Image (cartoon, helix red, strand yellow):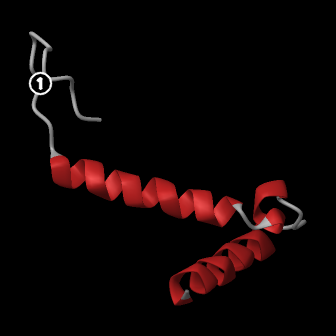
Amino acid sequence: MPQRRNRLDRRPFDGALFKARHLIENFFCKLKAFKRIAMRCDKTDRSFAAMIYLTAAIINSR
């Protein structure tokens, strides 16, 4: 997160890394909007992973 301008001890800020992190967090938020993913309704890890892949494909196609 960017720092305040009046901070005395300025630390380096990587804008590209911050932007990539923001995109990933937004993607997970969209992923959790699907009830089946958020509630973890699938019985096996394999079917849960398949549902995540399917949901990611749906999100990317929008």
46 or 8: nearer the eye?
Answer: 8
As shown in the figure, which amino acid type bears the numbered disc 1? Arg
**Nearer to me, 58 or 52:** 58
x then y, percent, for residue 51: 73, 77
Q: Residue furthest front?
A: 6
Among the 4 quarters of the image, the one containing residue 38: bottom right
Q: Identify which residue is drawn at 52% across, 64% down.
A: 27
Q: Is residue 43 left or right of residue 9?
A: right
Q: Nearer the viewer, residue 51 or 44?
A: 51
| Percent coordinates x, y for residue 39 in the rendering | 84, 56
Vertical side of 9 occupied by 60: above or below: below
How many numbered marks appear?
Answer: 1
- Give above or below for 38 relative to 44: above
Residue 41 to residue 22: above or below: below
Number of other residues with Cα within 10 Å of mark 1, as a class: few under 14, some 14 to 19, many 20 or more: few
Residue 59 lies, in percent from the top left, at 58, 79
Residue 31, quarter of picture: bottom right
Residue, far bottom: 61
In the image, is 33 to the left or to the right of 10?
right
Q: Answer with left or right where residue 17 lies relative to residue 53.
A: left
Occupied quadrant, residue 52: bottom right
Residue at (10, 12) in percent of width and height:
9
For the point 55% across and 86% down, the residue is 62
Q: Which SS class for mark 1?
A: loop
Residue 1 appears at what percent x and percent y?
29, 35
Which residue appears at 57% of the width and 59% of the height? 28
The residue that label 1 is drawn on is: 11
